[in-house]
Every structure is written in structure tokens, then in C-alpha cells.
């Protein structure tokens, strides 16, 4: 094993530094290589451990004095050989931490490696997303075996959000933790409703007389009956907004429901209906002349 330059690990050029400089250097390195912002990065984890090891030694005045004696021999005088380096490291390690020398065998430390995360996707309906649902998921392991487990999709989840399931990713090595499974949730539109952000759009068929005279209609959404008022002289393609009746927006509120009208004529007209339409046509012609 090689004698570690704790000052270099902390980004310091020499041992002629104050304890405040050591603390500041430690804070910068610890923040940069902290496992919480380097998830799954085994190299960053190893550096973080070296940084902590360096700081524990250099922040202790007694341990630092003993370490500096060896550091000056290695890096102050620039006189060392590979053979002496390995031997002296053993002596230094035992002297600093055990106060003497021993024939105890020093084994090479194996760095644990976190397993990789795995991504997968599931499709759910808008109603399932609105109320929340328990889902069953089947995955095939690297050994070809199929594993099945259930998990909960929370109510009001946003489209394309990820659900993290800890420990369901690839296996870790050398005692490292398993990776996580990241489930991407896709909220699918159905035949009647379309999701746009937190707003819901739907098309409502109305008759020509409902468009002309106005009407009250009912739409069933998420097990709720919503009353819609069609105004008089409504054209096909007009959008009627119903506030706070859309999808959940993730902040405790709901988006809006937009109802787009579509005028549908009868497939067949009775003689009486045909006469009524002709009468309307004559009235419109008379109105335009006036």
C-alpha cells in the first residue's frame, strides 16, 4: 500500500497550513464528493472516505504531529523508494493508530460498489392516477428468473413522474447496496378524456336545437356528475370551462375541465322535422333581407 498524502487529498499544497485552512478544504471536498449527490458513483464514494480519513488525522493535533513527521520524510525531502514507501507506510499506520509496531498483516481494503439503478415504465388510466392504485410488476433478473412484486401509485401522481423502489435495481458488489428501481408512470388518455398538464379536455355532442336554444347536460368524471350549461346559440367547437374540475396539479388543487361542443345532426329526418328546418331556413332568409 502507498503512503497517502492527506494534504493533497484535501487539495492543499503543503503541510504549512492552519487548522482553519484544513477545515475549509475539508468542507469543500466533502460537499463535492458526498454520497447524497453522487448516488451510485463508487469512485466518488472512495474519495469521500479518503477525505474523511485525512480530516480525522489532520484535525487532531497529536495525530497530525506524528503524521507530519512521516509526511516530511516522504514529501518534504522528496527522498523515497517504492520499497521504503511500502514498508514505512505499515510502520506509520501502526505508529499513528496503535502506538507501536506489529507483524499484523495489513489487508487491502475493498471498496463497496453500489448496484446500478434500473428504469421501467407502466401505463395507468387517468382514473387510477387520480385516486391512486396498487400495481403488480413483473421483472426478469440477470439470471433469467422472473420476480413479481406490488407497489402503490399515489393519488394525484403527475404524468411521467418516477416512483423509486429501493433495492430493486442491480445487485451491489463487495457489500455495496443494491440499486433502485425507477418506475416511470404514463397516464393514458381514454376515449372520452384527454389530459393536458393538469387540465382535462372532453368533447360533448349536442343537437342543433340544444345549440340554438341552450341546454343543461351532465358529464360523469371520476365518479362525479358534473353539470354543464350549454349557452344559447352555441357553435360547434366552442369550449366551455369548468374551473377546479380537472386533474390534480400536485399542489393540493385541481386544473380545469374544458368541454368542447360538437353539434350532431339526426341521421334521418321525419317529414315534420324537415318542414321545421325549412321554416327556420325561410325565417333566416327573411331576417337577412330585413
Image (cartoon, helix red, strand yellow):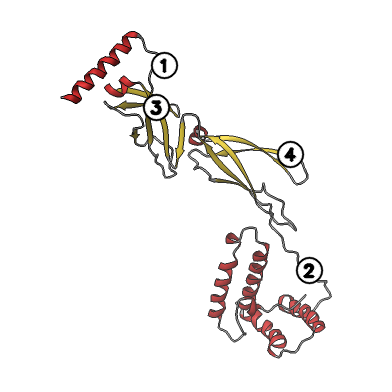
- Residue 158 numbered mark, or none: none
Q: Which residue: 44% across, 42% down?
A: 197
Q: Nearer the viewer, mark 1 or mark 3?
A: 1
Q: Nearer the viewer, residue 82 or 285?
A: 285
Q: Upstream in the sequence, badge 2 or badge 3?
A: 2
* Residue picked out by circle 1: 267
Q: Is residue 110 left or right of residue 230?
A: right
Q: Upstream in the sequence, badge 1 or badge 3?
A: 3
**Res. 214 in view:** no
* Residue picked out by circle 4: 146
In which image quadrant can residue 60 be found? bottom right
Q: Nearer the viewer, mark 1 or mark 2?
A: 1
Is residue 35 shown above or below 229?
below
- C-alpha distance separating marks 1 and 3: 18 Å
Q: Upstream in the sequence, badge 2 or badge 4?
A: 2
Q: Upstream in the sequence, badge 1 or badge 2?
A: 2
- C-alpha distance separating marks 1 and 2: 85 Å
- Residue 108 numbered mark, or none: 2
Is residue 290 shown above or below 121?
above
Q: Which residue: 42% across, 45% down?
A: 251
Q: Is residue 205 left or right of residue 72?
A: left
Q: Are marks 2 and 4 in contact (CB under 8 Å)?
A: no
- C-alpha distance separating marks 4 and 3: 45 Å
Amino acid at each position: 500500500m502507498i503512503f497517502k498524502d492527506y494534504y493533497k487529498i484535501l487539495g492543499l499544497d503543503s503541510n504549512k497550513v492552519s487548522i482553519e485552512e484544513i477545515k475549509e478544504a475539508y468542507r469543500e471536498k466533502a460537499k463535492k464528493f458526498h454520497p447524497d449527490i453522487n448516488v451510485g458513483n463508487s469512485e466518488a464514494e472512495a474519495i469521500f472516505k479518503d477525505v474523511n480519513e485525512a480530516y480525522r488525522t489532520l484535525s487532531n493535533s497529536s495525530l497530525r504531529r506524528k503524521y507530519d513527521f512521516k509526511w516530511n520524510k516522504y514529501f518534504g525531502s522528496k527522498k523515497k523508494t517504492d520499497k521504503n514507501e511500502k514498508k514505512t507506510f505499515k510502520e506509520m499506520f501502526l505508529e499513528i493508530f496503535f502506538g507501536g509496531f506489529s507483524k499484523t498483516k495489513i489487508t487491502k481494503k475493498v471498496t463497496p460498489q453500489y448496484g446500478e439503478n434500473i428504469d421501467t415504465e407502466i401505463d395507468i388510466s387517468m382514473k387510477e392516477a387520480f385516486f391512486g392504485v396498487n400495481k403488480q410488476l413483473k421483472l426478469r433478473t440477470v439470471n433469467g428468473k422472473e420476480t413479481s412484486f406490488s407497489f402503490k401509485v399515489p393519488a394525484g401522481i403527475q404524468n411521467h413522474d418516477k416512483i423509486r423502489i429501493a433495492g430493486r435495481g442491480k445487485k451491489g458488489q463487495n457489500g455495496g447496496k443494491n440499486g433502485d428501481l425507477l418506475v416511470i408512470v404514463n397516464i393514458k388518455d381514454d376515449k372520452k378524456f384527454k389530459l393536458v398538464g393538469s387540465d382535462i379536455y372532453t368533447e360533448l355532442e349536442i343537437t342543433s336545437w340544444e345549440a340554438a336554444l341552450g341546454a343543461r347536460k351532465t358529464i360523469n368524471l371520476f365518479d362525479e356528475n358534473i353539470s354543464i350549461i350549454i349557452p344559447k346559440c352555441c357553435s360547434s367547437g366552442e369550449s366551455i370551462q369548468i374551473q377546479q374540475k380537472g386533474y390534480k396539479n400536485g399542489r393540493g388543487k385541481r386544473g380545469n375541465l374544458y368541454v368542447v361542443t360538437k353539434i350532431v345532426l339526426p341521421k334521418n329526418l321525419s317529414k315534420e322535422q324537415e318542414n321545421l328546418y325549412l321554416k327556420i331556413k325561410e325565417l333566416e332568409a327573411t331576417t337577412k333581407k330585413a
